Amino acid sequence: MNTSTRPGPRVAAPWRVEPLDGAYRVTTDDRVASVEVTLPATVRAVHGFTSSWGLEFRPVGGERELTLGVESGRSSQGAVPWLGIETDEGWWTLTWHWSGNWAATAARTADGCLVTITFPDHVGAGAASPALTIAHGATRGSAGVCLTGALMGAAPRRAPLLTEWNHWWPYEDAEINEDVFLANAAVAAELGLEVAVLDAGWFGADGDTEWYRVRGDWHLVNNARFPHGLAWLADRTRDLGIDFGVWIEAEALGEDAAVSIELPEIVARDEHGTSLGNVCLGSAAGLERVRNQVVQLATTTRARWIKWDFNLDPGRGCRRTDHGHGSEDGLVQHYLALYRLFDELHELFPDTVWEACASGGLRIDAGLAEHVDAFFLSDPDWTEHHLAVLWGASQLLPARQILHWMQSEWRGEHRFQKVDYSGTLLRSTAFDTKVRAALLHRFGVSARLTEMRPDLKERLAAHVAVWKEWVRPLLENGSLSAITPQPLMDEQGHRTPAFQLVDGATRLVVGFRLPPAWEWEPVVPQGLQKGRHRVTPLPRGSGEPVELTSDELTRTGLPLPPREHDSALWLVEWFP
């Protein structure tokens, strides 16, 4: 229980406040469209994040009042469901457990800060309003650790923490086939990766089918690309010494999907009768269709990883009145059914990783976090962008639920994303930086492994070994936090960002030097125990271990790498 003497948040009935360890949970058993929370503190500034495709976790605020909201039907398509309240007494952070629409306002008042959260879809709904989690800390970072720690307690814990290779960005649905997938899976196994994930492009009977247009026809395997079927492909993948995973956008219906014609009763429609492009899980028929398709896919392939995407905005949700829900609560019933479905799938397939993705990071929230193992942060993943997004996500999600790949090799054009791991231009130290940027959470790679330069493959294998030995154990219960201000795109924001992953007396610290920074700044771990610490650069052999006191580390920081290096990873171990 929270034993602090600091006054906690105040709410009016029927809402109630339950103290947690370092945080509070605000709940109600009633249908209430909004909640007002008073935080007893003198507000300096209110902070938040906007969010859109490739622009997730963009900082906003800084004044004493801030209003944000989402009307897209996806919780973080428009803004992130999170607020940070900077006060004279420290920081409050709060989030709400809902995957649909919301509106939030925080403003300074005479007796503190009044935060109002509104759930427009819950008007007339048959379910209790979503919960809130609120945390307090002396700093933004410590408040984030308290918030993510509270959320970690509600997150699924069954599936193992696995590393993955995913085919998507270097091949998309244009170049992927059995031979390409298996060749890359073989290399992934040699590198120590544990699951090879087949992304979009495996379904639809026509070899020239565009994945986006035939979503929903999951019973049809693209026989031109995968003539032996998915069960055969999954078995051959496992024969190579690596598990099999697969992508699905189970809620979606493409324009050319045959299922929309065959089963019109499952289609979500707006008030004009127009298809929203998704199955309505609030209908019994729609839920049964999605459940059966996913169970069949998971059973047939024995997949250890299922990537569950959602590339559309349902808005206010289904407005039909023949689905078992009302004309106003279709979105609520859809998401409540989705939560229950994920719980059921976890029971049926406890060793499978269930990853949530939504055009990258456009459905990230504490509600869905109680039912999935991981969230994909953003489609783009070049290092600068990844670190900017990670900085924000680390204040909302437990580290074990964060997934973002090291910089991927894209087929398409992108101003920053392009990278070639087969050529001679990329410096090995620059490659190390791309890997380390995505190393302190769930780890994945989307690259042409069969064409990767031999020395880079060797370095990647070494980083994967470090992840397995040091990162994975800390992810079980550890907290990830930024220890510097946020870096931003276009060479803006803080240019020498650093993060730490901590569990007990052990921490991993990663630091970067981004253009146009020429010099390293001190990298100072936060929250060190008093006493001596052994500092070891990783991978082992990349530098000599040293012993330093907590006072020395606080005063001068960690031993910096040579000037020609743009990143470093340190293991910091405390001993009495």
Image (cartoon, rainbow, N blue to C red):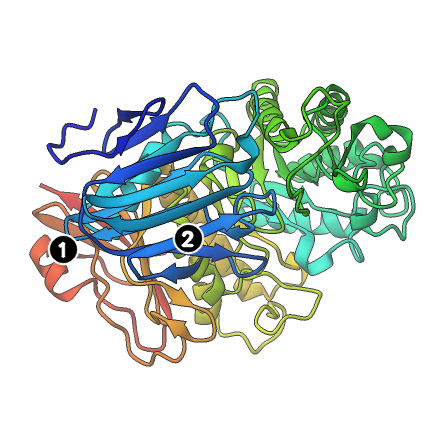
Q: Residue 407: name its quadrant.
A: bottom right
Q: Is residue 519 left or right of residue 516?
A: left
Q: Amino acid at mark 1?
A: Glu
Q: Amino acid at mark 2?
A: Thr
**Disc nearer the start of the sequence (2/1):** 2
- Between 188 and 93, the one lying in front of the other is 93
Residue 62, above or below 22:
below
- The span from disc 2 to disc 1 (Cα, nearest Å) is 48 Å
Q: Is residue 498 left or right of residue 456?
A: left
x 71%, y 35%: residue: 250
Residue 456, above or below 48:
below
Residue 188 horizontal/vertical position (percent) = 61, 49
Residue 483 horizontal/vertical position (percent) = 27, 57
User: Is any part of residue 506 visible from this angle?
Assistant: no
Q: Secondary structure at mark 1?
A: strand
Residue density around tag 1, few if under 14, some if 14–19, many if 20 or more, within 10 Å: some
- Between 548 and 155, the one lying in front of the other is 155
Residue density around tag 2, few if under 14, some if 14–19, many if 20 or more, within 10 Å: some
Label at residue 67: 2
x 30%, y 45%: residue: 144
Residue 136 horizontal/vertical position (percent) = 23, 41
Q: Secondary structure at mark 2?
A: strand
Nearest-to-viewer mark from 2 and 1: 2
Q: Quadrant of the C terminus?
A: top left
- Between 562 and 275, the one lying in front of the other is 275
Q: Is residue 571 left or right of residue 528?
A: right
User: Is any part of residue 294 visible from this angle?
Assistant: yes
Residue 498 horizontal/vertical position (percent) = 31, 60
Q: Is residue 502 left or right of residue 346?
A: left
Q: Quadrant of the N terminus?
A: top left
- Mark 1, residue position: 547
x 42%, y 58%: residue: 436
